[in-house]
Image (spheres, rainbow, N blue to C red):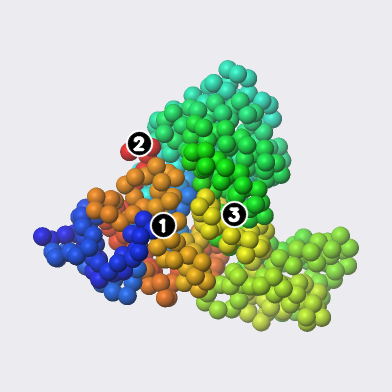
Amino acid sequence: MNHDLVIRNGTVVDGTGDKPFEGDIAIDGNTISAVGQVNGQGREEIDAAGHAVTPGFIDLHTHLDAQIGWDPHMTSVTWHGVTTALLGNCGVTFAPCRKEDREFLAGMMETVEDIPKYAILNGLPWDWESYGGYLDSIERLGPMINVCGLVGHSATRFHVMGERAIEEQATPEEIERIAALAARSVKEGALGFSVNRHPGHTLPDRRPIPGTFASREEMLAIARAVGAEGGLMQTVPNFGKVDEEMDLLAEEGESSRLLFSAIGEHREVLDEKVSAMRAHGVDITAVTVPRSGGGVGGLATNNFWRTPTWNELRKMDFDARLNAIRDEGFRAKLVAEVRDNERLNEQVLHTTKRYYPMGDGARPNYTQPRYESLFDIATAAGEHPTEAWLRLTLESDGKVLFHHRGFNVNLDNLEKMITTDWAMPGLGDAGAHVSQMIDSGWATFVLSHWHRDKGTYSIEEAVRRIAAVPAHVLGLSDRGTLKAGKKADLNVIDVDRLEERQPYIVHDFPGGAPRFQQRAQGYKATVCNGQVTLRDDEHTGVCAGQVLRNGA
């Protein structure tokens, strides 16, 4: 029997957590037709000898909602084995949306997720109002990989309450309408509902985004309505009130599956609360960045200190910046304006204890010990941190980048969290904070660091956590494992060579706005719905993605 595609002689890591085994995989159309020994020939064959064959990875936390409009390749996640991406996290979505509300939603996305408003308004077709219409529009764009979405609290609440949604509590009648609209969006294909209760996420005028302080009654009504339609509730909690937030999630979990964003700094209380929920039958899963989360800065970015001369540098292009800092007098002004400003200097001395150079090798370093920060490098050299920043930048011809660790700072504590049964690695935020951070390669990091380099995960456990568990969270029973009859989303990986490459800035957003990209090494092939979308770390140009809808 002939097949459309056969992957031969691979080490099959099937996503279930079972031990790997040597075997072949046959694919016909968009479906896996055989796993084990395949006797028939493939119209195309991939020799996977010495390589792991895994399910495609599922990214539970992206903000590619805007970027997908002009980048159907959805870079950078498609260089890192991801074959399904969840849009619409953190309560901020572009649907439901009346025509007159587009500018409001675009401005909110800009301030919350650092996606330029101009690019949003000009890069998307905006040919929808309902959430189902939004999914139809995404489908017409023809994405490279599978896309599914959550409907956001902010858009839903604003659709019902208008301007009052920002700072007022909903009336009982409005709560009923919000919950009904959430349920209708799930019926139209959303996999669930996303909530953002983090006070730091604000509108352009610094008021809270709609829903930040929504009442318990509103949240439970939404959870009941969404859960009744088979949807999940995704939450960014207010970690300033972590006990209260977890208690609210416990109540929501009586009606709906739960997904929330976690950080290692609250590991102990989260472990206690979430373990108790799971013991009582609540289906709750957390996702967290599998390394320190935070920004990335360097000469090519605008993450500089705010003084007149640093602002002058900010206005230049990269080559002009590099030439400027080669001038000793210009460098002296940059250093003096920070060092001589008492308040700013104190801030810099504190924050640079969490700035870590990512190295000059092809692979970025995300795991330096605590006392190898920019502050420590400067102290050892008898320099001010800004002097050390400038020296390292010059030594690398402007290429060095600095990782600004903001949360999950203690990697030992992080390791304890991501080995619990409830916290999964992820939270790459692809498509958001595009000129400030880049964690799209989180899945590559899990396999290269936490499996191969450190041995924290076996390969079967690493793959289970980034494929099968996310599939369960999203209710996608047809993906996440390599079994006959499942959809043919998979990777062929040279685990020994696998690693991320150094991030770099491109200017490919509508209007020329900058963003980071990050590539990978070690992916022999990625297959989405039976078609090869990536071969030897390069896109093939094939866009084989589907919009995955609730109940489909």
In what element is the residue under mark 1?
Answer: helix
Residue 368 versus residue 122: which sits nearer the camera? 368
From the viewer's perspective, is residue 449 above or below residue 179? below
Tell us which disc is closer to us: 1 or 2.
Answer: 1
Query: How many other residues sit within 10 Å of disc 1, few (<14), some (14-19) or many (≥20)?
Result: many
Q: Is residue 243 visible?
A: yes
Q: Dot 3, how many residues are within 10 Å of its Cα: few (below 14), some (14-19), or many (20+)?
A: many
Q: Tell me: residue 432, above or below residue 376.
A: above
Instruction: Tell me whether circle 3 and circle 1 mark residues in contact (CB < 8 Å).
Output: no
The mark that comes first in sequence, 1 or 2, is: 1
Residue 30 located left or right of residue 351: left
Report which residue position mark 1 lands on: 464
Residue 551 is marked as 2
Q: What's the CA distance linking mark 3 and mark 1?
A: 28 Å
For the point 87% across and 63% down, the residue is: 341
Alpha carbon of mark 2 to alpha carbon of mark 3: how far? 32 Å
In the image, what residue type sits under mark 1?
A: Arg
Q: Amino acid at mark 3?
A: His
Residue at screen point 39% across, 52% down: 468
Of all residues shown, which one is farthest toward the top?
Answer: 173
Q: Is residue 356 left or right of residue 385?
A: left
Sequence-first tag of 3 and 1? 3
Classify mark 3: helix, strand or loop.
Answer: loop
